[in-house]
Image: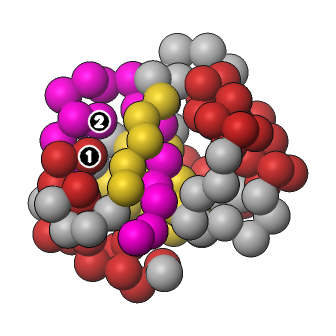
Amino acid sequence: MRRILVIDDEPSLRLLIRRYLSRRGFRVDLAVNGEEGIRLCQADRYDMIISDCHMPGPQIAGILMELRRLEPSIPILAISGLAQPDEVQRVLKAGATRFLAKPFDLSDLLRTILAMS
């Protein structure tokens, strides 16, 4: 079973992603912000991280750089409602592997995860 960490401050989206992916054989842990996501990555190993780009607290660039320091080769899927080209490039440059714009269809999320695996 593949383990995924979802970092997002939107409770309904976190739970929806966990329920959807759990039904497809993934083990999904949840974090409400970047600091909690970093703590979970320090304590455990994940096969992939899905992180929102806009949450209260530290900027996504700092979060991505710290996640990269902890797990240099882990795939990180950044998700955001702001999908302007400069935003996408900034997030990819900070360490995300791929970018998926919100709102997204859950089947698109799954296809992206499988493509990154």
Say whether marks 2 and 1 touch (CB < 8 Å).
Answer: yes
Determine which residue is flagged by label 2. Answer: 14
Determine which residue is flagged by label 1. Answer: 18
Q: Tag 2: Cα neighbours inside 10 Å, few (<14), some, or many (≥20)? A: many
Left or right position of 81 against 74: left
Whole-percent x and y of residue 64? 70, 46
Whole-percent x and y of residue 82? 38, 42
Element carrying mark 2: helix
Residue at figure coordinates x 63%, y 35% from the top left: 40
Residue at figure coordinates x 86%, y 51% from the top left: 69
Left or right position of 67 against 87: right
- Under mark 1, the amino acid is Arg
Mark number, residue 106: none
Element carrying mark 1: helix
- Real-space Cα distance between discs 2 and 1? 6 Å
Q: Is residue 36 above or below residue 69?
A: above
Whole-percent x and y of residue 83? 39, 51
- Under mark 2, the amino acid is Arg
Quarter holding residue 37: top right
Instruction: Specify the segment rendered in magenta.
Output: 1-17
Quarter holding residue 6: top left
> Visible in this render: residue 59?
no
Foreground pick, 58 / 46: 46
Left or right position of 79 against 110: right
Left or right position of 52 against 81: right
- Quadrant location of the N terminus in the rendered image: bottom left
